Each structure stands twice: as structure tokens, then as C-alpha cells.
Amino acid sequence: QVQLVESGGGLVQPGGSLRLSCAASGIIFSFYNIDWYRQAPGKQRELVAGVTIGGTTNYADSVKGRFTISRDNAKSTVYLQMNSLKPEDTAVYYCNADHPLSSRLDYWGQGTQVTVSS
């Protein structure tokens, strides 16, 4: 059974930091590209950051220079370090694992709430 479990969300003041974690089980983690998405109320889910099997990273323009994605294959875990948080970063953050050779091998976590407010 495949599971992706996000953690680390919470309430933070503008300008603060949070680190999200996504722990995977039931898959060979190193074989998957991993992405973080977010969805704010009334908005579509959007890609925030991604890290490929080879370690290449990409970011949405809105978070470049503030967020950093990293992966630890030994721990089957991906992290999203979020600095200089803004109220517009408020959303539910989801972890996604997708296999580059099969669209059927695509898994989602349950999400973790991030709220940026004073």
C-alpha cells in the first residue's frame, strides 16, 4: 500500500518559516519525481516546487528565492523549506509522487494546512 504522509504545516506569521515533510512508503522512492502542490480556497491546485529523480529542482515564480525543495532518498522523504512566508502562501499543501515511465504510478498525500496570518 502506497502512502505519502505530509507534516509540518501550521499557523505562522508573515515573514516566518516552516518546513514541510512528505514521507513515502510502499514505493521505491528514488524512482519517482516528487512535487509539492498547493490549493487555496476557491482556487485551482497549483504546482509549487518539484525535484526529479536526478535531483533537478524547479519552482513556481511566486516562490522562487523563498522556498527550497530537497529529497532524502535514504529516508524516502522530501522536504519543502518555506521562508519569508506571505499571506498568499496560505493553502493546503500536497505531496505528489509520479513515476516518469508510467502515468498510472501517480500518488498523492492527504495534504497539510499552511496558514500565514498575523
Image: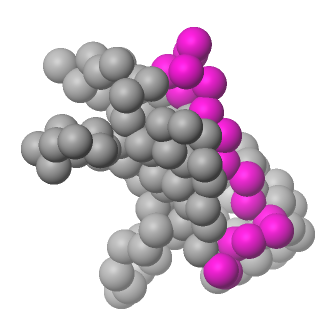
Which quarter of the figure is the N terminus placed in?
top left
Residue 3 on image: x %, y %? 30, 27
41 relative position to 2: left or right: right
The one of 117 and 19 positioned closer to us in this rendering: 19
Q: Residue 17 occupies which quadrant of the picture?
A: bottom right
Direction left: furthest residue = 104
The one of 113 and 3 positioned closer to us in this rendering: 3
62 relative position to 84: left or right: left
What residue is rendered at 65% in x and 80% in y? 61
22 relative position to 43: left or right: right
Is residue 18 visible to us here? yes
What residue is rendered at 35% in x and 42% in y? 97
What residue is rendered at 55% in x and 21% in y? 73
Residue 89 on image: x %, y %? 64, 73
> Colour mode?
one colour
Vertical position of residue 13 compared to residue 40: above or below = above
Q: Which residues are magenta?
A: 61-77
Vertical position of residue 75 compared to residue 43: above or below = above
